[in-house]
Image: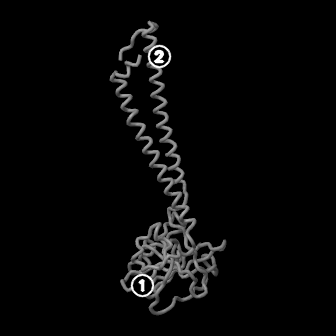
Amino acid sequence: MYRFLLTPRWWGINLFVVLAIPFCLFMGTWQLGRFEAQVESHQAAEARPDQDTRKAAPLDELLPVDQETSGRQATATGRYAEQFLVPDRELDGKRGFYVLTMLRTDGGKALPVVRGWLPGTAGGSGQPKVPAPPSGEVTVTGALQASENAEAVGAQTAGGLPDGQLGIISAASLVNMVPYEVYDAWVTLPEGDAGMRAVPVTAPQGSELNLKAFQNLGYTLEWFAFAAFVVFMWFRLLRREAEAARDVELGLAAPSAQ
């Protein structure tokens, strides 16, 4: 009855099944691993304290910023230079500005330092009076942060803001605003400078459970469903061929060409 399994057509069907099932299971497992990795990253970010308790390290030892070094205490020495306001930043439900000051290091590159937060609104009398940065050489220690992107913070580009303001904190947004090279990272001081309020450390970008993470979970279910469908169709074809072969043996149907 099952001699049809030796025909070329069924050799092809069986080969397809043998290859398709492991492939679907591999892809489903891979997508599940990506989802679990984002869940673990999100949980680690949620558990991260506002200030990392590990010993501070020189800035260059912690670059480039990743999910492991984001939030680490970094130290840098230099002199404060240009200062900017980053508008539309919320703290405890109030809108205000980050006070961002460039720290020129001995190596020539500058580190953006968020010295604190001031309340206020963009434009008119809402712009706050910004305290001047300390003069002379200073050593700062602050929580390391990765450069922002406009999509993540919903900010405007620097070109759409008044002079002295920028929408996102990144080397790309500062390249046309300062005449020197800028680190692709920034730090926030643990205590607000000159009476300003300290800016809390934010979770690393990409650690949140976004739509893409749940797409990975959906793809996981799809690949496992494909594997189950292949098995289902193989048994269905097998049963139909077996029934056809039985009918031929009983003389109820004419043999079909294989």
| Residue 75 in the image, given as x and y percentages of width and height | 45, 82
Residue in front for this viewpoint, 135 or 130: 135
Q: Is residue 27 left or right of residue 191?
A: left
Q: Which residue is mark 2?
A: 243
Q: Residue furthest right?
A: 93
Q: Residue at x 35, y 17 (%)?
A: 258
Q: Give amino acid for label 1.
A: Arg
Of all residues, the one furthest to the top in this rendering is 251
Please state the horizontal and vertical placement of residue 94, each as a whole percent of the image.
66, 74
Which badge, 1 or 2, is on the more N-terminal residue? Answer: 1
The image shows residue 244, relative to residue 191, as above or below, that is above
In the rendered view, how is the structure colored? one colour
Mark 1, residue position: 104
Is the Cβ of the residue at disc 1 closer than 8 Å to that at disc 2? no
Snapshot quadrant of residue 111? bottom left
Q: Can the viewer see residue 175?
A: no
